[in-house]
Amino acid sequence: MIERRRDVIPACHASQVGPPSVLLLASEPKSARAAREFVREYIEYHLPGVTSEHLGSAVLIASELVTNSIRYGTEPDDLVRVVLDVDNTRTRVEVHDPVRRHPRLRTESGARDRGRGLIIVDALCPGRWGVTDRPFGKFVWAEVAAS
């Protein structure tokens, strides 16, 4: 007879510590605010003593990527997923949506009142962002280096 140890909790039942690393958002403009709050709470919990510059950059990047995703990567009733990963060297922000079309970095123009999101992302983390296809859509990611 095989006896199960009662003091070991199976991984599927292990409790999570702190805020979750994934947030699902509705495809609507007010979701950018929810993403900013989520990123701030997650980073402050998992990186105590984080600099305000690092935190502000990650929050702004998440806001820009979510806004772009909602504007160009979703239809009504679609969901956007924000995935975070932090460690002592960087914070990674991913925004997943169901549309395969890749965003592109445009040159800055005073004639347009929008289209600056990736310019901001590129300025905050040059060379540390990109787009990756996934089975049902894509995700845009950016990494903010620890300061």
Image (spheres, rainbow, N blue to C red):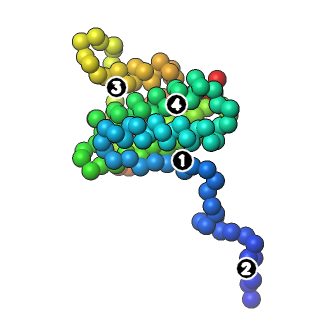
Q: Residue furthest bottom?
A: 1
The quadrant in which residue 10 appears is bottom right
Residue named by callout 4:
58
**Label 2 belongs to which residue?**
4
- Whether residue 15 is visible, yes or no, is yes
* Residue at horizontal 24 percent and vertical 44 percent from the top: 75
- The residue where tag 1 is placed is 21
**CB under 8 Å between callouts 4 and 3?**
no
Which amino acid, by three-letter code, is at mark 2?
A: Arg
x and y, in percent, of residue 34 in the image: 42, 41
Amino acid type of the residue tagged 1 in the rendering:
Ser
Say which amino acid is labelled 4: Ala
Query: If you read the primary sequence from the N terminus, does the residue marked by circle 3 or circle 2 appear first?
Result: 2
Give the structural element (helix, strand or loop) at label 2. Answer: loop
- Kindly check if marks 1 and 4 are in contact, taking CB atoms under 8 A apart as contact: no
Which residue is under mark 3? 104
Percent position of residue 2, x then y: 74, 84
Task: Look at the numbered disc 3 and give the secondary structure of its residue.
Answer: loop
